[in-house]
Image: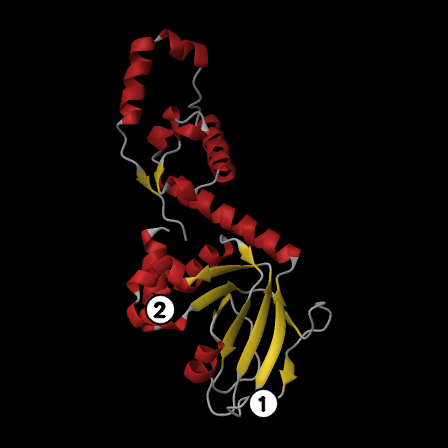
């Protein structure tokens, strides 16, 4: 995980603060959208509101006792949420060793933009109210799913953002040394997919052509000494820092 994303997550979990200057809410949403989808049951406690309002992402816990005793208030409310193929961030998995006692909350963040349903067939929207539990709290059950269209749009937007970030940190003077996706080197390189690298390469090629910088391949091979010198220079370029949100 990128250090910037880690910093944002730790600040959110430990201080319950989302820094607007860091676009923290969006950073967490984009990182969540990159995680593998899960189908699990989680729990969420509310102090007053018997509904879950729309958001970029939601926070919940894998422990019903935490939701009931730590987050639900008065006679309200505990939600039993069955996720259906939804990308999630397991907080303890990523930063559990850096949040102290907050580990006990067993927090899960799941991606927003989906729909809550009253039934497991996903045909009736809303929250199914159950009998009050032994602690006199209102209890609801629901199934949560993202539409295929939303997932597709979300992934497209994440790829677009990553490509724009990569292009923003590559010096145009390096374009002549970039001819394949293997020439694109970043810190945390594994966070940039081959699909994203290809899009970055395609854009660089366009910019070369537009700027009249495309070189004749055969001609450059004839000037072996100069080409070799450029390659050495290329290898000495310090890895660029790619911040994945």
Res 178 → quadrant = top left
Asked if residue 17 shows in the view, the reply is no
Q: Is residue 123 above or below residue 203?
A: below
Closer to the camera, 213 or 106?
A: 106
**Residue 242 x, y percent position in the rendering:** 36, 44
The residue positioned 35% from the left and 38% from the top of the image is 186
Q: In screen coordinates, is 120 left or right of 1?
A: right
The residue positioned 54% from the left and 65% from the top of the image is 112
Closer to the camera, 20 or 58?
A: 58
The residue positioned 65% from the left and 55% from the top of the image is 149
Badge 1 density bin: few <14, some 14–19, many ≥20, Cα 10 Å? some
Badge 2 density bin: few <14, some 14–19, many ≥20, Cα 10 Å? some
Q: In screen coordinates, is 240 left or right of 134?
A: left
Helix, strand or loop under label 2: helix
**Residue 244 x, y percent position in the rendering:** 40, 49
The residue positioned 59% from the left and 69% from the top of the image is 82
Give the residue furthest to the front: 134
Q: Is residue 212 above or below residue 115?
A: above
**Residue 194 x, y percent position in the rendering:** 49, 36
Helix, strand or loop under label 1: loop
Q: Is residue 127 above or below residue 177?
A: below
Which residue position holds label 2? Answer: 103
Which residue position holds label 1? Answer: 132
């Amino acid at each position: 995980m990128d250090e910037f994303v880690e910093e944002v997550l730790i600040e959110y979990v430990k201080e319950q603060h989302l820094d607007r200057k860091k676009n923290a809410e969006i950073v967490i949403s984009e990182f969540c959208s990159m995680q593998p989808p899960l189908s699990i049951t989680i729990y969420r406690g509310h102090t007053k509101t018997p509904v879950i309002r729309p958001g970029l992402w939601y926070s919940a816990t894998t422990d019903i006792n935490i939701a009931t005793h730590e987050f639900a208030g008065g006679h309200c409310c505990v939600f039993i949420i069955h996720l259906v193929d939804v990308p999630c961030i397991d907080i303890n998995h990523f930063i559990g060793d850096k949040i102290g006692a907050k580990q006990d909350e067993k927090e899960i963040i799941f991606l927003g933009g989906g729909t809550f349903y009253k039934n497991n067939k996903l045909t009736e929207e809303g929250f199914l109210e159950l009998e009050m539990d032994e602690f006199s709290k209102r209890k609801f059950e629901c199934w949560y799913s993202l539409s295929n269209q939303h997932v597709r749009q979300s992934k497209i937007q994440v790829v677009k953002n990553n490509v724009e970030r990569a292009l923003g940190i590559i010096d145009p003077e390096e374009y002549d040394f970039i001819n394949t996706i293997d020439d694109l080197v970043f810190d945390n390189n594994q966070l940039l997919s081959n699909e994203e690298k290809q899009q970055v390469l395609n854009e660089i090629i366009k910019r070369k052509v537009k700027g009249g910088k495309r070189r004749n391949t055969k001609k450059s091979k004839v000037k072996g000494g100069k080409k070799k010198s450029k390659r050495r220079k290329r290898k000495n370029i310090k890895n660029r820092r790619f911040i994945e949100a």
